[in-house]
Amino acid sequence: MQPDVIVVGAGVNGLSAAALLAAKGRKVLVLETNPVPGGAVQTAEVTLPGFRHDLFAMNLGLFAGGPVNAALGERLAAHGFALVPSAKPFCSVFPDGTMLGVEADVERTVANLAAVAPEDVESWQRLTSYLGEVAPTLIGVLGAEMPSRSLATTLWKARKKFGTTGVLEIAKLALASTRAFTEENFRSPKTRALMASWGMHLDFAPDLSGGALFSFLETIGGQMFGMVIGQGGADSMINALVGVIEESGGRVVCNEQVTKIIVEGGRAVGVRTASGMEHRASRAVIANVNPRLIPAMLPKDQRTRPDVARAEEFRPGLATMMIHLALDDLPAWTAAGAREFNYVHIGPYLDDMAMTYTQAAAGLLPDSPTLVVGQPTVSDPSRAPDGTHVLWVQVRVLPLEPREGSWDVMGEAYADRVIDKIEQYAPGLRSRILGRKVLTPADLQRANANLILGDSLGGSHHPAQFFFLRPVPGWWRHRTPVDHLYICGAGTWPGGGVGGGSGALVAAAVG
Ligand SMILES: Cc1cc2nc3c(=O)[nH]c(=O)nc-3n(C[C@H](O)[C@H](O)[C@H](O)COP(=O)(O)OP(=O)(O)OC[C@H]3O[C@@H](n4cnc5c(N)ncnc54)[C@H](O)[C@@H]3O)c2cc1C
């Protein structure tokens, strides 16, 4: 039977769009090139049997609070999707053996701050109240199509509530760098580092415009929303989305790479796959594909159009490496309390992060990589055999095309340097390692073509390709210049992460 909608790619956004459309009665077909769905959300035993590692994304907070979970939450739960909350979402550790942690409780977080950086308690409390005031505006903007009536309504309400100056303050927050924002608000380098670490999760070194907003939301919001991971692994979210699609009559077919989008009379009508199959859709083709890769999938008369070809200008963020460890015990952090947190950030300070980013952008291997050390078994022990643990180490940021040579040659040696750095904060880590799997930036791209050169973000989030400009001017509202060809995924508004926001927006656009 001919589907109404074909979705190319089974990432979280493609699956979200398919699930929402199938739930309202549309016939959907999802085609995925990999043997399993999920894209940058996958769980597998890559070190030792019984140790389940989230290979890429682990923190499902954006999905938990996002539109897909709001619409389909009960049905996803019926397909086995459950979230495990953490009372202690993240902390930063420092060379003097101290740490600063954000807990899912304002009073406890303030007590942590009072012990390490008492001079910042008042500012912290002020920013906590400020987030409470501006959250409806920020959530409204981040959840709205760009541009749209809903966006205009959110901004109009914000102007009524905060006045023109208040709205301009929010605009300043959206454009500020983490250095400017944290220097304006905090005096301790530790509090500044705690917040700026979140900028590095995206591609915001401390001095880049646009880094403050995400850092502010994650750091201050961490007290209110905590962190959640998927029970047993992040893939439970993917499996549940597939379950909803299939019980609604849709299909998800793996091992099918789409090589061509068929365009007739200026309109996308179907796709061709590497295996020689042709599939036609009556209503729309949705590409859950990095915008940069789309022109090459189109017929020549379409891909040479200047408004189509410009998608090739879409720039990746810097690269990421993942190191997965099976451990016989958690790291023995010198700052002992760090053992209880889901994420431990190691910069340590803003200047270190700035240096790391500059070296990576210049094609050099950073001397001192910025690290996010994830400890999922702290809150979900089901991911490893009794008494043992998995460690999820994300190395942010690395060169896309290193001058020193190929990742396939240098990957393991660089991973050793990463372990050396963790050892400075958790001596003896090496002796606790039972198994290790390194995924270099080149491995990331091999696992998912959307992660160009190992860019985990599916496209840089710098202001020139964010908000109205994502992915490129003219490709907004999840449409492309080709009729009936829609696009979703990290390369589209509202950007990377597992929130499913662009999947929900494209489902609404297709109707
Ligand atoms: C290492 C890493 C860690 C991360 N950590 C987090 C985290 O903790 N929390 C968070 O919120 N976000 C995290 N992210 C970001 C988040 O995982 C991604 O932004 C998000 O999953 C991207 O989803 P997507 O819908 O864009 O699709 P993708 O994940 O890019 O999936 C798209 C799918 O389409 C398939 N595909 C592409 N081209 C074709 C084709 N021609 N034919 C058929 N199939 C095709 C691909 O194989 C892939 O499976 C992380 C990302 C990485 C890489």
Image: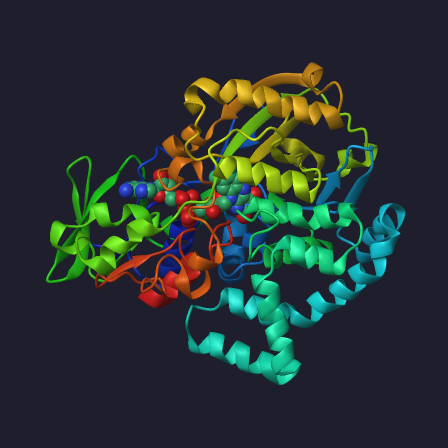
> Residue visible at 35% across and 38% down?
449
Q: How many marks?
A: 0
Residue 122: x and y in percent read: 84, 62
In depth, the one of 132 and 309 nearer the eye is 309
Left-right relation of 110 to 159: right
Please say which color scheme the image uses: rainbow
Which residue is rendered at x = 56% and y = 31% of the image? 366
Visible residue check, residue 370:
yes
Residue 386 visible from this viewpoint: no
* Residue 368, quarter of picture: top right
Q: Choose between 19 and 405: the one closer to the eye.
A: 405
Q: 425 left or right of 369?
A: right
- In the picture shown, does residue 30 fall above or below 4? above
Q: Quadrant of residue 58?
A: top right
At which x and y percent is residue 164?
Answer: 61, 82
Q: Quadrant of the C terminus?
A: bottom left
Q: Residue drawn 45% across and 23% down?
A: 404
Q: Look at 41% across and 72% down and name the residue there.
A: 147
Quadrant of the displayed image that contains ligand 1: top left
Percent position (x, y) of residue 160?
A: 61, 85
Q: Extreme bottom residue here? A: 160
Drawn side of residue 423 relative to residue 399, left or right? right
Position of residue 403 measured from the top left corner of the image (x, y, whole percent): 43, 27
**Camera-side residue of 303 and 401:** 401
In the drawing, does residue 301 fall left or right of residue 109?
left
Q: Is residue 321 above or below residue 279?
A: above
